[in-house]
Amino acid sequence: MTGTTSRLQILMSTDTVGGVWTYALELAEALAAYDVSISLATMGARLTADQRRNAARLDNVTVFESQYRLEWMEDAWDDVAQAGTWLWEIARDTKPDLVHLNHLAHGASHWHAPCLVVAHSCVLSWHQAVRGLPAGTGVGPLSRDRQGRFAGRRSGRRPDPGNARHVAAILRDTGMLGSSIQNSILTDRGFSHGAKP
């Protein structure tokens, strides 16, 4: 060892069609101060020009772009399976110290590094927690069985980007073990807990 520390490497998945994108970029920007390198694997849709510019301004981020459908999208399960293989290949090539998944589907994969699963949302659990009723038709390909099977049943803490009722419903419906970490966003005054971006 020459006395220098090697850069910590994280493989992070994100989607490009909602607030998870903002979350991922803000986290990547904050981690740059700690010499953390992010391999950012995008799914859902191609990056917009603005998204591409925002990612390019972060020196610690390398983008791996795809159009794989997300687990909550219609007819997504073939794409979800292919995305799992794609993510595993990125992990094989980048050798991350941590895998940070911003979706549930690949949490049970056999990663060669610790894996953090962040449950930003779940259509079934959201409907039950917010509306007080089971989700009806129109939910598409999601089912409690499929979400639970893909997410796995790992223990640990999972950051909570939603309210406590919603997270409790996600943990119940997927069979995941864990606890939540209160949602926060970075403002010019520091972190604001429970705030909506």
Image (cartoon, rainbow, N blue to C red):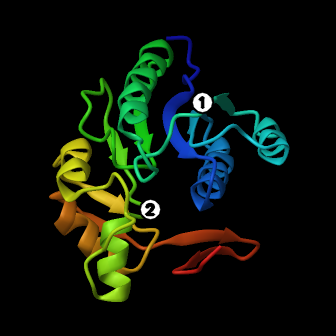
- Location of the C terminus (image quadrant): bottom right
Residue 72 placed where, x, y %?
42, 53
Residue occupying the point 63% across, 47% down = 16
Answer with left or right where residue 137 lies relative to residue 40.
left
Q: Residue furthest front?
A: 137
Residue 148 visible: yes
Q: Nearer the viewer, residue 119 or 68?
A: 68
| Three-letter code for the amino acid on which mark 2 is drawn | His
Q: Nearer the viewer, residue 83 or 192?
A: 83
- Considering only vertical position in the picture, is 140 above or below 169? above
Going from N to C along the chain, the mark reached first, 2 or 1, is: 1
Q: Dot 2, how many residues are within 10 Å of its Cα: few (below 14), some (14-19), or many (20+)?
A: many
Q: Nearer the viewer, residue 162 or 191?
A: 162
Residue 54 placed where, x, y %?
80, 45
Answer with left or right where residue 79 lies relative to residue 190.
left
Residue occupying the point 63% across, 29% down = 65
Mark 1 highlights which residue? 66
Residue occupying the point 25% across, 42% down = 150
The reply to whether the C-beta atoms of the residues labelled 2 and 1 are less than 8 Å apart is: no
Residue occupying the point 40% across, 47% down = 71
Residue 165 visible: no
- Considering only vertical position in the picture, is 27 above or below 182? above
Which element is circle 2 on? loop
Q: Nearer the viewer, mark 2 or mark 1?
A: 1
Mark 2 highlights which residue? 120
Q: Which mark is residue 99?
A: none
Q: Dot 1, how many residues are within 10 Å of its Cα: few (below 14), some (14-19), or many (20+)?
A: some
Residue 8 placed where, x, y %?
52, 30
- Report, in whole angstroms, how far the alpha carbon at label 2 lies from the one at label 1: 20 Å
